Amino acid sequence: MDIRIAGHQIDTGAALRQYVNDHLVQIVSKYFPQCLRASVTFGSRRHAIISCDIIIHAMRDIILKAGGMDKDAHAAFDQAAAKIEKQLRRHHRRLQTKIQQNTPSIGEAAAVLAAETAKADEDNAHYTVFDIEEDEKELGEHPPVVAEMQVDIPTASVSDAVLMLDLRNTTALLFVNSKSGNHNMVYRRMDGTIGWVEPQ
């Protein structure tokens, strides 16, 4: 497995790199011995806080993300690594269950649930206004773009897209619906449920 360790405004010494490499290989090899690559990025935050972001490319189209923050780089990594291990274990268990049951997908159940949720949303439509933090107020109307990346849009069933959303530890996922061929989006709502957007 190719592991890349980087630091933004922080020095990642040889001891930290060795610690990260050893622990990440141990965690990932338990569940995905054929893992493609991983990247670990440390960053400096306010009040002497260090952040650690881990991205694992376990298989093609399976990307896991997790982060941790602490005043110590090792502790920040341990937090993120614990989250990654939990995601790897959950995904490995789901794959094993899917293989044992030999079912193609549970997309129909997710589609029914999403349709019921969409119907309930139509009846109770509302807008949510988010609080703006002090740092964001200083940026004015047009905050700068801080990250830009190109990603492949996966083709998946709705249930598999929800699984990818969970594994990637993100709030939204754009995908091509394997049934309709249209671009769809699943997202995590403020109440903890999953929303599904399918254009007509």
Image: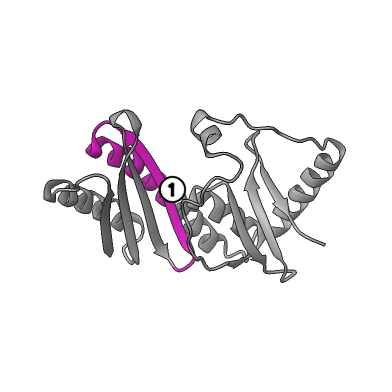
1 in the magenta segment: no
* Front-most of residues 8 and 99: 8
Which range is magenta? 60-89
- Residue 101's x, y, as percent? 57, 60
- The tally of labels here is 1
Q: Residue furthest right?
A: 123
* Front-most of residues 30 and 37: 37
Left or right: 178 as drawn, with respect to 31: right
85 in the magenta segment: yes
- Seen at 60% across and 50% down, the residue is 172
In this view, 123 is above or below 92: above
Residue 36 placement: quadrant: bottom left
Q: Which image quarter is the C terminus in? A: bottom right
* Front-most of residues 190 and 48: 48
- Seen at 36% across and 50% down, the residue is 54
Q: Which image quarter is the N terminus in? A: bottom left
Q: Secondary structure at mark 1?
A: helix
Q: Which residue is mark 1?
A: 87
Left or right: 71 as drawn, with respect to 184: left
